[in-house]
Image (spheres, grey):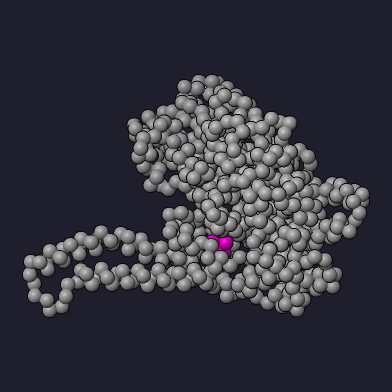
C-alpha cells in the first residue's frame, strides 16, 4: 500500500541509524559501524513505538542517551543525533563538538532546520574550531509519532485550548497553524505523496489547509524535491485525498465513553505510545507493549469488551488443547512394548514438540497479558458502570436526548466525577434545545458530587450562542458570528455539533460519513461546499471545485486538529474495510486524547472565560 506510514517512517529511521547509507537486502548497512545515539525527549517518543533495543543493537547502536544529560567522552566512535531543530539543542551540539565527545557527529533534525539555527551551528563550531567534527546535517521530516500502520499523532499538546482561547492573538494562532501544517508536511514528505486537500470553509481547518497548500507549492518548485510520484494532473484515483477537520466539527466524540477494547484500554488504563502499566496478579505493576507485533491486539482491538473476554477464553482453550496434543504425542503409550520403530516415531514427535515450544510459549504470554489487562478493565467497568455510560450516550446521540429521570439517575449513580461531567456535556451537545430547568437540575447534581463545572458552563455558553445564531436572520447572524468570534475564538464553529452531526441510525460517526462522501466524489449537499486545494494545480484554480479533484479516491488521510481519539480511528478503519474493493484510510491528529484529557482542555477554556465553579480540582490524567 502506498500509504503505509509506519513502514515508511521506520525505514527512514533505520537509514538514519546507519549514517544515512544505502541499505542492503537484509535492511542493514554493508559496512557495520558501532555508534552512539543521542536524542531529545520528543524524538525519543518518535522512536519508542517503532524501534526496540534489540533493533538498535542490530544497527550497531551500542549506547543511547538523552541530549540534555551529562555525558562522558567516547572517543573513536561516531554519534548519530536525532533531535528537534531548537536553539537549546543546537547549543548542546556545539558544546559536544567543542569538547570532542565523539569521533564525528551525524546530525539529523526531525524537521527542516531554519536558516538562523543552521548559521548558529556553523558559527558555534567555527568559533570552537570543531567544525571538522560535524560529519553531515540532514533534515529528516519525521516530526510525528506513528502508533499503528494507519494512525499518527503530531504530539502537539493543548492545540484545542490554544486555537479556541478567546485571548489568543492573530500571531499566536498563526504560529500554531504553521506548526500543524509543518507536521502534516513531514507526514506527506515521508509518504512521498502530494494529496488533493479538502476541508470545510472557515476555522482552523481552512487555515491549516491553506498554509500546507502553499508549503507544498513552494517545495514542488525545487528540482530535488521530496515527492517522487509522477507530476502533472495525475488522476485522483492514484492520489490520496487529505481531509482536514477541526475538533469542533464533532465535539462529543472527544469525550464519549466507548465500550470497545482498544478505546477502553486507552481511556481507562492510559495507553501511552503503545505502552501500558497495570497492577499485576501478584502485586506490583506490570508493563506491556500493545502494538502490531501482538496478534491478539491487532485482531480484537475494536471488538466490544464482552466479545474480547470470550475470545481470550477461546484462545486459552485452544492453547491447552495444543499443549495436551504435544504431551500425548511425546509421552508414549502405556504398556506398549519397546521397539526400534517406536523410538524413531518418538524422536520425530520430540523434535516437533521442541520446535513448537517457542510458539506455544509466546501464545501463552499473549493470553496471560490480555487476561491481566481484561481483569483490571473489568474491575473499572463494574466500579464505574462504564457499560451503562457507553450505551446511554450512544442512545442519547441517536435519539437526540434522554429522559430527565434517567439523566439524573446516571449523574447520581456510579462513576467518577469526570464520567458524570462527560455524560452531562454530551447531553448538552445532543439536545436540540436547552431546557433551563433540566440544565439547572444537572448543575445542581454535578455540584452535589463536587464536580468542577467549568467545562459544562463553557459548552453551555457555546450552545446558547449557537441557538442565537439559528434563530437570527441572515443579516444579524453575520454580526453575531463576527462578535462571537472576537469574544470566544474559533469555538463558535461548534455550531456544527448540531443534530446533523450526531450519530446516524447505523451509529456511524459524522466524521466517517463525511470522509465517505469526500472519497466517493459524487454530488453530496453535505460536502459540496468543502474547499479544494491542489498543490500541483495552478494557484488560480485552488479553492475551487475542479471536476478531476472530486474523486473517487481509494486512499485518504484524515486529520483532526485539536485532538483525536481511538473511537474515530476505529470508525474510519471499519468503514475502509467494509468497502469493495477495500479502501485505505490513515487517521492523524495533533494529539491523541482520552475523554478526561479533552474535558480538562474544555475546563481550561471555561476558566479563561470566567465560567463555572472550581469546587473540585481537575481529575488526574489516568
- Nearest to the observer: residue 200 or residue 442: 200
Majority secondary structure in the magenta region: helix
Query: Which quadrant holds residue 549?
Result: top right
Residue 321, image x and y in percent? 32, 72
Taking 367 as reference, is 78 above or below it?
A: above
- Nearest to the observer: residue 461 or residue 80: 461
Task: State the count of labels.
Answer: 0
313 in magenta = no
Residue 590, image x and y in percent? 63, 48
Residue at 49% across / 41% down in the picture? 8
View extreme (left): residue: 339
Residue at 47% across / 30% down in the picture? 106
- Nearest to the observer: residue 255 or residue 379: 255
Drawn side of residue 536 relative to residue 339, left or right: right
Taking 85 as reference, is 612 above or below it?
A: below
Q: Which residues are magenta?
A: 261-265
Residue 606, image x and y in percent? 77, 57
Residue at 83% across / 57% down in the picture? 466
264 in magenta = yes
Is residue 74 at least partly visible in the picture? no
- Nearest to the observer: residue 393 or residue 74: 393
Query: Which quadrant holds residue 350?
Result: bottom left
Drawn side of residue 48 relative to residue 610, left or right: left
Residue 403, image x and y in percent? 75, 76
Is residue 456 at least partly visible in the picture? yes
Residue at 63% across / 44% down in the picture? 551
Taking 335 as reference, is 606 above or below it?
A: above
Taking 494 as reference, is 410 above or below it?
A: below
Quarter occupied by the C terminus: bottom right
Amino acid at each position: 500500500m502506498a500509504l503505509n506510514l509506519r513502514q515508511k517512517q521506520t525505514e527512514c529511521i533505520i537509514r538514519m541509524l546507519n549514517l544515512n547509507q544505502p541499505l542492503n537486502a537484509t535492511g542493514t548497512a554493508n559496512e557495520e559501524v558501532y555508534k552512539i545515539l543521542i536524542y531529545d525527549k520528543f524524538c525519543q517518543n518518535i522512536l519508542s513505538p517503532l524501534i526496540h533495543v534489540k533493533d538498535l543493537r542490530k544497527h550497531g547502536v551500542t549506547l543511547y542517551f538523552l541530549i540534555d544529560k551529562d555525558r562522558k567522552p567516547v572517543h573513536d566512535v561516531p554519534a548519530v543525533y536525532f533531535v528537534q531543530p531548537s536553539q537549546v539543542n543546537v547549543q548542546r551540539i556545539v558544546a559536544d563538538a567543542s569538547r570532542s565527545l565523539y569521533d564525528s557527529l551525524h546530525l539529523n533534525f526531525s524537521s527542516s532546520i531554519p536558516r538562523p539555527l543552521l548559521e548558529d551551528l556553523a558559527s558555534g563550531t567555527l568559533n570552537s574550531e570543531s567544525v571538522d567534527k560535524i560529519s553531515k546535517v540532514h533534515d529528516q521530516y519525521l516530526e510525528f509519532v506513528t502508533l499503528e500502520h494507519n494512525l499518527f499523532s503530531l504530539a502537539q499538546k493543548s492545540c484545542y485550548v490554544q486555537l479556541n482561547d478567546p485571548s489568543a492573538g492573530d500571531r499566536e494562532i498563526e504560529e500554531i497553524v504553521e506548526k500543524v501544517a509543518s507536521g502534516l508536511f513531514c507526514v506527506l514528505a515521508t509518504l512521498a505523496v502530494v494529496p488533493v486537500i479538502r476541508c470545510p470553509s472557515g476555522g482552523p481547518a481552512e487555515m491549516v489547509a491553506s498554509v500546507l497548500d502553499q508549503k507544498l507549492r513552494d517545495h514542488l518548485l525545487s528540482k530535488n524535491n521530496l515527492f517522487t510520484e509522477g507530476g502533472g494532473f495525475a488522476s485522483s484515483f492514484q492520489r490520496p485525498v487529505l481531509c482536514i477537520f477541526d475538533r469542533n466539527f464533532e465535539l462529543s466524540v472527544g469525550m464519549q465513553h466507548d465500550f470497545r477494547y482498544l478505546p477502553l484500554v486507552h481511556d481507562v488504563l492510559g495507553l501511552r505510545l503503545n505502552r501500558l502499566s497495570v497492577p499485576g496478579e501478584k502485586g506490583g505493576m506490570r508493563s506491556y507493549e500493545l502494538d502490531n507485533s501482538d496478534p491478539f491486539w491487532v485482531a480484537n482491538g475494536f471488538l466490544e469488551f464482552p466479545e474480547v473476554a470470550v475470545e481470550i477464553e477461546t484462545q486459552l482453550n485452544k492453547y491447552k488443547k495444543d499443549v495436551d496434543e504435544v504431551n500425548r504425542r511425546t509421552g508414549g503409550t502405556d504398556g506398549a512394548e519397546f521397539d526400534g520403530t517406536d523410538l524413531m516415531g518418538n524422536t520425530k514427535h520430540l523434535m516437533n514438540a521442541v520446535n513448537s515450544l517457542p510458539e506455544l510459549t509466546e501464545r501463552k504470554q499473549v493470553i496471560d497479558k490480555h487476561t491481566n489487562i481484561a481483569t483490571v478493565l473489568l474491575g473499572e467497568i463494574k466500579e464505574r458502570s462504564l457499560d451503562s455510560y457507553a450505551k446511554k450516550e450512544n442512545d442519547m446521540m441517536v435519539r437526540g436526548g434522554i429522559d430527565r429521570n434517567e439523566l439524573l439517575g446516571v449523574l447520581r449513580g456510579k462513576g467518577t466525577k469526570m464520567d458524570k461531567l462527560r455524560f452531562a456535556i454530551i447531553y448538552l451537545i445532543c439536545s436540540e434545545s436547552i431546557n433551563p430547568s433540566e440544565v439547572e437540575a444537572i448543575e445542581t447534581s454535578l455540584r452535589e458530587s463536587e464536580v468542577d463545572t467549568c467545562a459544562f458552563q463553557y459548552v453551555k455558553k457555546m450552545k446558547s450562542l449557537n441557538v442565537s445564531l439559528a434563530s437570527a436572520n441572515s443579516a444579524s447572524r453575520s454580526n453575531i458570528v463576527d462578535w462571537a468570534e472576537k469574544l470566544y475564538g474559533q469555538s463558535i464553529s461548534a455550531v456544527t455539533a448540531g443534530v446533523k452531526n450526531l450519530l446516524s441510525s447505523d451509529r456511524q460517526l459524522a466524521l466517517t460519513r463525511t470522509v465517505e462522501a469526500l472519497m466517493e466524489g459524487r454530488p453530496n449537499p453535505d460536502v459540496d461546499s468543502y474547499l479544494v486545494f491542489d498543490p500541483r494545480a495552478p494557484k488560480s484554480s485552488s479553492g475551487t471545485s475542479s471536476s478531476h479533484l472530486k474523486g473517487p479516491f481509494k486512499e485518504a488521510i484524515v486529520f483532526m486538529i485539536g485532538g483525536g481519539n481511538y473511537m474515530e480511528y476505529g470508525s474510519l478503519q471499519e468503514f475502509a474495510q467494509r468497502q469493495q474493493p477495500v479502501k485505505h484510510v490513515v487517521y492523524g491528529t495533533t494529539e491523541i486524547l482520552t475523554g478526561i484529557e479533552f474535558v480538562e482542555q474544555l475546563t481550561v477554556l471555561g476558566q479563561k472565560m470566567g465560567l463555572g465553579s472550581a469546587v473540585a480540582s481537575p481529575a488526574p490524567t489516568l
